[in-house]
Amino acid sequence: MTEPAVTGTGTGTRAAPKLVLDNVVKDFSTRRRKTVRAIDGIDIEVGDGEIVCLVGASGCGKSTLLNIVAGLEQPTSGRVTIDGETIVGPGPDRGMVFQSYSLYPWRTVSENVAFGLECIGMPRKDRAERVQELLGIIGLARFADNHPKELSGGMRQRVAIARALAPEPDILLLDEPFGALDAQTRRAMQEFLLLVWQRTRATILFVTHDIEEAILLATRIYVLSSHPGRIVEEITVPFGANRGPSVLRDPRFLDLRDEIQELLTTQVER
Amino acid sequence: MTDTSLQPVPGSGPRTRSGTGASNLGDDPAAPWRRTAKSGSRGRKQGVLFRLRDEIPLRHRILLAVIGVASIFVFWLLAATLWSSGNVLVPTPLAAWKAFIDYWQSGELSTDLWASLVRVAEGYALSMAVGIVLGVAIGSFRSVEAFWESPIGFLRYIPATALTPLFLLWLGIDETPKIALIIAGTVFYNILMIADVTRAVPRELITASYTLGASRLRVLTRVILPHSLPGIIDVGRINLAAAWLMLVVAELLAAQNGLGYRLVQLQRFHQVDGMFAILLIFAVIGICSDLALRGLRTLVAPWARP
């Protein structure tokens, strides 16, 4: 995360690429010794302070792609770099939030957020300060000493986001983080994420199948095809960094939504 | 609970479609098997006691538990009056209680109880230690699993009681063979069940920890172990019964003290009341250790309370 003092205006102009995926391919071998290509020739760039969204139907390998960036899986070929350095394994510089609740049930909210800080060996006092700050950002300071099972689904995901942000990652990876939430909570969480992004200016790579979510949040969208996952379109979203939920009524929002819907539908029919 | 909301309004709905109005027994001439039990209601009403996997009222639960315990004593009394002499001699509960008091006051109870408790504690502690180390390793690393799976799968089908003569031959008749037998009879169950507990740690929890910068050692000690802890205590609780089984086998064959040894002594003099007292002591020890381990579980892992 960088300080709020941002270089450039952030609207439309692309900052220097932070994350680069260069011709990434991933094959899986099935039981009958066949190989299935999950993703094929993916080129993606994510600039500093951008929210980039990967949109696609199920089976487009978008989660695989995110796992590769996280270092949890290795690409069959191609290169993934952050600030020019090749990714070989997972690390705290790439915080990840999963769809399912991956909080530690035996730790309180603040202890959950502190986990990554313990890993990087931050002293206890600094840790407490940083946790306090993050709980303020996610609006859960009152729940610092509660356990995850005492929280609602949306609150748990907010804790998961704070936990991933705690070690100040270069990039935040979100794998359908709101997919398991009900519609109202999901909308609230989208606005929450937008707010977090505007306050922290974290670089975010986001995977979703929800088109409206992608347009609402992303500065740029990559639309992926299925079987294998290929990029069929790269779309720059015309709304600035200071957008709010009002863009949902913007005519450009509706046009964009239809355009992406069209792209995905032809993919399904193909 | 939802029954009332599903009540049809009388005289309305599709059931009066035949026009006769009066007949709502579901006598559809085209489908005579479509009968409903009662007029004016739909669906099958379920009794309160036998709903599949459903809760029953607390009063019923307590009542059933009391009846359950009482029926043991009724059965016992019945057997005691039926077989009060001859070869199959059954003492009354009172006689067993008196034998227990004598056993206690003679001071032999505390010696025997202590001897048996120490043996189980030593043997089972070692068994659990091995079980935790190997079980967690097998559940965490596929390589360790591949190495140990076949040997354990092979060895665990040797009945542990069949090892008794061999252990007595090798290790003499002092404490060592008894402890060895307790280990042999429980360690494989402990290993395999703890491995299962460890495998149940959600994958997302492990991958999330990696992306937070945790090393594998940290994931093992700070994620896999705490998540497995309540399950490990459960395994310990369940397999403790097998430890007592092995103890008694060992004490029956070769011992100078202990509850199992006392059982054989009493048998020699046909003191059935004393034997019954010892059986009840085993049961009480079992219930106490079970409750203690359940308490320990809620104490160390309150988050995992069901």
Image (cartoon, coloured by chain):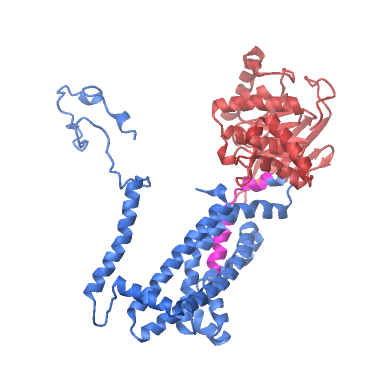
Chain colours: A red, B blue
> What residue is drawn where x is 41% and y is 78%?
B103
Q: Is residue A80 left or right of residue B222?
A: right
| Whole-percent x, y for residue A222 in the image | 70, 28
* Corner quadrant of residue B192: bottom right
Q: In which quarter of the image is the N terminus of chain B?
A: top left
Q: Which of B106 and A244 is in front in this view?
A: B106
Whether residue B211 is visible: no
Q: Nearer the viewer, residue A209 or B68?
A: B68
- Residue A188 in the image: above or below residue A43: above
Chief secondary structure of the magenta span? helix
Q: Nearer the viewer, residue A171 or B244?
A: B244
> What residue is drawn where x is 26% and y is 73%?
B80
* Corner quadrant of residue A10: top right
| Whole-percent x, y for residue B166 in the image | 53, 84
Q: Is residue B219 left or right of residue A146?
A: right
Q: Is residue B13 in the magenta section?
A: no
Whether residue B173 is visible: yes
Q: Nearer the viewer, residue B156 or B143?
A: B156
Q: Is residue B204 in the magenta section?
A: yes
Residue found at the very far front of the displayed protein:
B105
| Whole-percent x, y for residue B222 in the image | 68, 52
- Residue B89 in the image: above or below residue A199: below
Image label count: 0
| Whole-percent x, y for residue A254 in the image | 62, 16
Residue found at the very far top of the displayed protein:
A251
Q: In the rendered structure, which segment of residues is drawn in magenta? A: B187-208
> What residue is drawn where x is 41% and y is 84%?
B265
